[in-house]
Image (cartoon, grey):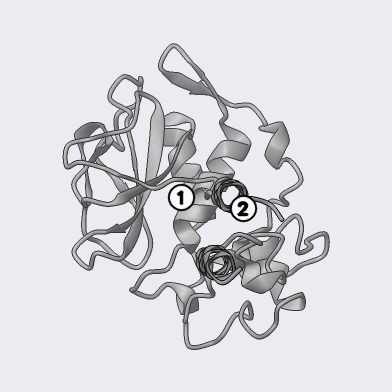
Amino acid sequence: MTPLWMDVCLIVFLATVVSVGSTQAHVRVKRKPGDRPKPGQCLTFNKGGTSGFHYYACCNNINGTDKSCDGRTYQRASTTSYCNSGGTDNGNGVIKAEFACGGCPGQGIVAKKCKPMKIFNIPGTCWLFTKCFKKYCKKRYSVQSSGLNMQVVDPSSTSMPDTCYNTVCETGETPDNCPVDCCFKMNPSQCTWVTNGTCIPEFCDTPSCSESGGTGLFSAKHTSNIGGLVLGLVILSLYMHEYE
């Protein structure tokens, strides 16, 4: 029979491993009013705006040769401005990603590319535009030089077809290279486009959209369950030693 302290140490060790393994890859950082992207970069935000649930993007182009889009808010289904000069965040949103996007010309091209069909362009918390904006910006403009973005293909995103994010799973698109359009083939109960304009869940933009609801093995729900299991093991171990 092992001593009590050894059992407790083992359980604590297992709990630590589980905690490390369940750490989310992307940690959301609350932006302070007045923060802005680095020169030549863009930031996407969520949980901001007047509703507290809006998705939008701001870009810093004040050091570029073309400043025509300075202060423009890149978003869908809203006309409210949440970006001030230099991409300064005025919507008090939560940062999601930072990336280059080719200055005003590149941002304009990508914004036009990601403009949704009218039937899906509804107010609300839809994340589709900012996800599309980020992915196509990173695909087309991933190198920054002297404050200006140079056009270059990002090797990590070349597999995404240019037809992606148009709400139709077309020839050449699969749940792996364009999950946002095709994941309904793997998870039809949650990732199917509907005619009433309701946005599909955000996990439908990941290739794992059919696995555990698309949240992965260590989702917040799973982490909570594992934490409860570890706590139960600790209590059980103490109880058994008390009556031995």
For label 1, the SS is helix
* Quadrant of the snapshot with the N terminus: bottom right
Is residue 98 shown above or below 183?
above
- For this orientation, the residue located farthest to the front is 244
**Pick the front one: 28 or 42:** 28
Q: Earlier in the sequence, mark 1 or mark 2?
A: 2
Query: In front: mark 1 or mark 2?
Result: 2
Q: Give the residue at x 46% y 50%.
A: 111
Q: Residues within 10 Å of mark 1 (few under 14, many from 20)?
A: many
**Pick the front one: 196 or 229:** 229
Q: Is residue 143 left or right of residue 118?
A: right
Is residue 65 shown above or below 9?
above
Q: Give the residue at x 61% y 47%.
A: 6
Q: Give the residue at x 35% y 68%.
A: 77
Q: Is residue 191 left or right of residue 169?
A: left
Q: Which label belongs to residue 22?
A: none
Q: Is residue 88 left or right of residue 170?
A: left
Amino acid at dot 2: Asp
Q: Quadrant of residue 105?
A: top left
The x, y position of residue 242, in whole percent, is 52, 67
The residue that mark 1 highlights is: 111
Q: Give the residue at x 18% y 64%.
A: 50
Amino acid at dot 1: Ala
The residue that mark 2 highlights is: 7
